[in-house]
Amino acid sequence: MTTLTIKEIATIKRTTFRSCAVTCLVALCPLLALADEQYTPVVNPVSPLGVDVVPEVARVPGKHFTDSRDMNYQTTPHSVSPTQIGQWDGTGGAQNGLHLASFNGEMDVYEIDAMAQIRDPLLNAVVANRTSLVVSTSFDQMLGNDTSLAVERTNGAAETFAVRSQIVSHNHPGGLLRDIDSVDLWGREDVNRAGFYSFQGDPNNTAIYTHQILAPGGVQPYVSSLQVALALGNPDLEPLLDIDALMVRDIGTGFNPFDGTFGAGDSILFSIAPIPNPNGGPNVFDGGEVWHWRFGQQAEFLKHGGHLWDTAFDVQGTFGTQSENIDALEAVSAVPEPTSLLLGATGLACLWCGRRRRIA
């Protein structure tokens, strides 16, 4: 009988383990290839606390979006489907969300290019420069890489929030994101929480529509193009306007959390598509502007990251992108992780101890 040394036994165990691991990996390969075809719900979500902490994208709940063309994510390859909203999990999986044309058949010729929740939880925080602003620009490809959604921190620093493969990366032809065109975050995993929409070209002189469950129901006008033009101080802009990025905080009235009208206490954060100068020369607006509009007041350029989001702000230079045009707006924040809190507490304790020693 052959007696093995301890070293020989350990070698056999390592070899056997590696062989089993390789066998298991090969067996799982078909499953791994299909994993990104399935939407994976967020199981450990973060909460929007309103501080400047950028969370992992996969832990932000209720993420919805549209591509440069509204797409159906249940077909292979994905097919164009106007007013179809997608839901993404942050790891490349996507599924169909709400389809607005199902509620109003007249909408099946429109493409969504902006959407927002009824009461965006971080609108006030981003206006106060307490949390990070999320933006996308035409053609994506931001920050010199495949970034589709970038953040501007409160100090003005630009960072990646999500790359293209984290939004849609399905393993079949046509299974990649083309150019994100609208985004909404912080919804429920099982419900599409977006309640406001703007369509490409702002049809019917309507800048923003609302989708309501209560009467009159369906998809209804919320803000007209003329109202936006007047808020910008120039009614002649009405036929030229096209809102293509949006956040909304509608506080409702009385016991109704959402009354479907833009009224006292409501506010909107928005950007518009570029407006060319009819006489040639620089655009009237280059699309990189972001305005904050409180009901009953004139719209004002958002001040965030230490600067105004006006025409003079260099979007291309800041985000390393091909276009000045902002075509998606959101905000992110999170409760600091326990490790961060522990480090902060440790730092404070060290400062306190040092101060005690100096006093002694």
Image (spheres, rainbow, N blue to C red):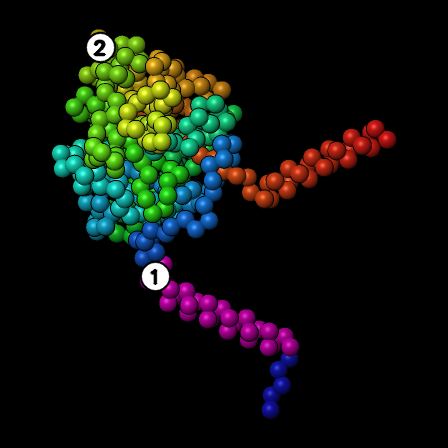
On residue 31, which mark appears? 1
Judging depth in this view, the residue of 304 and 269 nearest the camera is 269
Stretch in magenta = 6-32
Q: Give the amino acid at mark 1.
A: Leu
- Check if residue 19 falls in the magenta segment: yes
Residue farthest toward the right in the current orientation of the protein: 360
The residue under label 2 is 236
Q: Where is residue 138 drawn, in percent x and y? A: 30, 29
Number of the front mark, 2 or 1: 2
Q: Give the amino acid at mark 2.
A: Asp
- Horizontal arrangement in the rendering, residue 59 relative to residue 283 (left or right): right
Residue farthest toward the front in the current orientation of the protein: 255
Label 2 vs label 1: CA separation? 57 Å
Task: Examine the rendering and report whether any part of residue 290 can be seen.
Answer: no
Name the quadrant of the C terminus: top right
Residue 130 versus residue 277 in the image, above or below? below
Picture quadrant where residue 224 is located: top left
Q: Where is residue 77 drawn, in percent x and y? A: 21, 49
Picture quadrant where residue 253 is located: top left
- Check if residue 28 falls in the magenta segment: yes
Picture quadrant where residue 280 is located: top left
- Horizontal arrangement in the rendering, residue 182 relative to residue 335 (left or right): left
Judging depth in this view, the residue of 181 and 337 nearest the camera is 337
